[in-house]
Image (tube, rainbow, N blue to C red):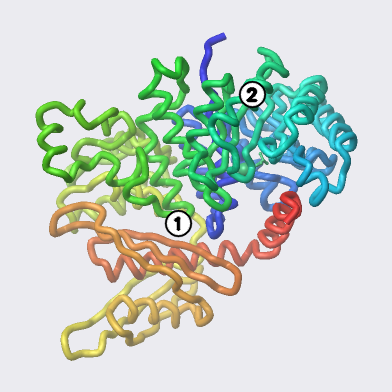
């Protein structure tokens, strides 16, 4: 069999556990389709026992993914396992991912079990999973702080009961590359060549990618991680970094992945927009400065030969050289073709909506860039909006009080209101707040990026709002930053409405996750 590293993406499960990153079903489906199209091997869709809503969302992801395996997470309890199987049984390629902790710290303080009891749980859980599904992954939570002999015994039991993949999570981001190397070599020797050994590294010490690569060098053949390195606390291993490290240092590592790296920037932006977790400019591979050369000496070298300072080409990871794509003469086919190149799949209705918005944008902007298209598509695929901004009018100038009048549609009802503010953005947000009666919504964060150059640049506004314990996000772009801000605020209100409709489920799910973690 061809030797390659399987990429297991857990953006929709571990990634969604990042504070404030809860995604709507539409957003999860969008990301899942994209991950499938770019060639990841496994997509972990969620933890179905957490709530009925989570189960349904895993079910829908399972139905939308055709090539990758779809994994559902469960504890070793029968109820968890049956819920997970219910969620993925119709997937083209289902995988059950069952876990229990193996470290003495977890056994004593969380599970209150003896080692013998944990082995019995593994026997029960993995056997039941294997009765239901051919592909079964067993994870030993907190593996890197577990006694190595006991860890190997746990994996032996799991394999004897039918596990096809064993995962060695560095749950608390504690291990070091040379230590992880020793652990992985022992596990590989224990389970033998027919079982895939997997890594799952958290980034608490900033070592998640380094540890994942050390594991591959030691014989692991599956890496778990998230796009943009999101995830609980400091996050998980960044998939884009692992993929490119294996691609750029292919000769040294001797093994690669099946991921189409040219889609990395597109999926990174999609995850950024769906989670509201922005990407730092100097982030490897997908940060906007990742290929920018400021210093004169670098620029001189780059002009002479790009090899002087570039170890990979921007286009290898999906940065297009000029990003200039379409204009007002472009038709629907050209738009569809470019969207397909960017990895989006739109049905005819969605394409119609996107094309309408594209034409309207062309009236205001001479050239349309990829960044414009990302926003356009996100809007076109958003079918769950409760509120729509129908109009926003504002006035400001030196010596006058900024005022705004907003018209917002809430389902079929239309509300209009006017407000004043410290500036036009503030006035616009206050007017929208009055339209929808969102007095308790607090604006926690607001920032603006100029996403394309020129005097007709699109401004992209990101906002984060809070109502009680719920944190929601929204973003929007427009050539007018007041309009972009107003749209972003409405997007955040829509996200908040989604979260509120699931508030008890979200609370129950997060309690369950915390309980599963022993917090
Ligand atoms: O970090 C962890 O240990 C996990 C497991 C459930 C795989 O996410
Ligand atoms: Zn994890």
Q: Which residue is depicted at the point 17% across and 53% down?
A: 453
Task: Classify mark 1: helix, strand or loop.
Answer: loop
Q: Residue 448 in the image: state x and y as whole percent.
A: 30, 63
Q: Which residue is mark 1?
A: 276
**Mark 1 to mark 2: distance in Å?**
33 Å
The residue tagged with tag 2: helix, strand or loop? strand
Relative to 388, is 505 on the left or the right? right
In the rendered image, is residue 64 in sight? Answer: no
Residue drawn at the location 67% of the way across and 47% of the way down: 56
Provide residue 136's location: percent of width, then percent of height: 72, 27
Q: Residue at x 50, y 40 (%)?
A: 207
Among the 4 quarters of the image, the one containing residue 260: top left
Q: Which of labels 1 and 2 is toward the front?
A: 2
Within 10 Å of the Cα at label 2, are there few (<14), some (14-19), or many (20+) other Cα atoms? many
Nearer the observer, 328 or 269: 269
Residue 28 relative to residue 117: left or right? left
- Which residue is more in the foreground, 502 or 405? 502
Q: x%, y% of residue 262?
A: 35, 30
* Residue 372 on image: x %, y %: 28, 50
Q: Which residue is mark 2?
A: 197
Q: Report whether residue 248 is seen.
A: yes
Q: Quadrant of the N terminus?
A: top right
Which residue does the image show at 10% across and 32% down from the upper left? 303
Quadrant that contains the C terminus: bottom right
Query: Is residue 19 depicted above or below 184 in this figure?
Result: below
Q: Is residue 513 left or right of residue 225?
A: right
């Amino acid at each position: 069999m061809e030797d390659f590293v399987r990429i297991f993406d857990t953006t929709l499960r571990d990634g969604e556990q990042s504070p404030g990153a809860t995604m709507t079903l539409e957003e999860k489906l969008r990301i899942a389709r994209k991950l499938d199209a770019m060639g990841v091997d496994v997509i972990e869709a969620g933890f179905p026992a957490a709530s009925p809503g989570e189960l349904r969302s895993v079910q829908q992801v399972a139905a939308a993914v055709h090539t990758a395996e779809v994994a559902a997470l469960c504890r070793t309890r029968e109820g968890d396992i049956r819920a997970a199987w219910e969620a993925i049984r119709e997937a083209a390629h289902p995988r059950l991912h069952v876990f229990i902790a193996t470290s003495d710290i977890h056994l004593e303080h969380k599970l209150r079990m003896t080692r013998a009891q944990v082995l019995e749980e593994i026997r029960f859980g993995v056997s039941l999973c294997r009765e239901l599904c051919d592909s079964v992954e067993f994870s030993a939570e907190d593996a890197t702080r577990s006694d190595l002999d006991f860890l190997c015994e746990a994996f032996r039991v799991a394999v004897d009961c039918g596990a096809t993949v064993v995962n060695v999570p560095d749950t608390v981001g504690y291990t070091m590359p040379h230590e992880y190397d020793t652990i992985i070599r022992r596990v590989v020797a224990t389970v033998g060549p027919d079982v895939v050994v997997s890594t799952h590294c958290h980034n608490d010490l900033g070592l998640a990618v380094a540890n994942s690569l050390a594991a591959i060098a030691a014989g692991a053949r599956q890496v778990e991680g998230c796009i943009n390195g999101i995830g609980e606390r400091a996050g998980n291993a960044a998939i884009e970094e692992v993929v490119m490290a294996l691609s750029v240092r292919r000769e040294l590592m001797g093994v690669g992945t099946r991921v189409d790296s040219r889609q990395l920037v597109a999926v990174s932006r999609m995850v950024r927009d769906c989670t509201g977790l922005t990407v730092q400019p100097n982030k490897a591979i997908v940060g906007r400065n990742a290929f920018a050369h400021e210093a004169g000496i670098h620029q001189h070298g780059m002009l002479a030969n790009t090899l002087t300072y570039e170890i990979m080409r921007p286009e290898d990871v999906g940065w297009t050289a000029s990003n200039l794509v379409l204009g007002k003469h472009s038709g629907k086919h050209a738009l569809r073709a470019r969207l397909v190149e960017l990895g989006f799949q739109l049905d005819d209705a969605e394409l119609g909506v996107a094309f309408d918005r594209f034409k309207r944008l062309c009236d205001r902007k001479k050239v349309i860039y990829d960044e414009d298209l990302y926003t356009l598509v996100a809007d076109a695929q958003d079918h769950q909006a409760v509120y729509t901004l129908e109009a926003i009018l504002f006035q400001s100038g030196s010596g006058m009080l900024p005022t705004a009048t907003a018209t917002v549609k809430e389902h079929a009802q239309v509300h209009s209101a006017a407000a004043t503010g410290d500036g036009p953005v503030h006035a616009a947000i206050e007017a929208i707040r009055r339209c929808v009666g969102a007095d308790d919504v607090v604006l926690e964060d607001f920032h603006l990026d100029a996403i394309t150059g020129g005097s007709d640049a699109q401004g992209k506004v990101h906002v984060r709002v809070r109502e009680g314990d719920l944190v929601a996000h929204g973003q929007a772009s427009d050539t007018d930053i007041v309009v972009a801000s107003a749209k972003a605020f409405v997007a955040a209100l829509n996200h908040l409405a989604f979260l509120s409709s699931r508030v008890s489920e979200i609370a129950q799910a997060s309690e369950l996750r915390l309980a599963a973690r022993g917090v």
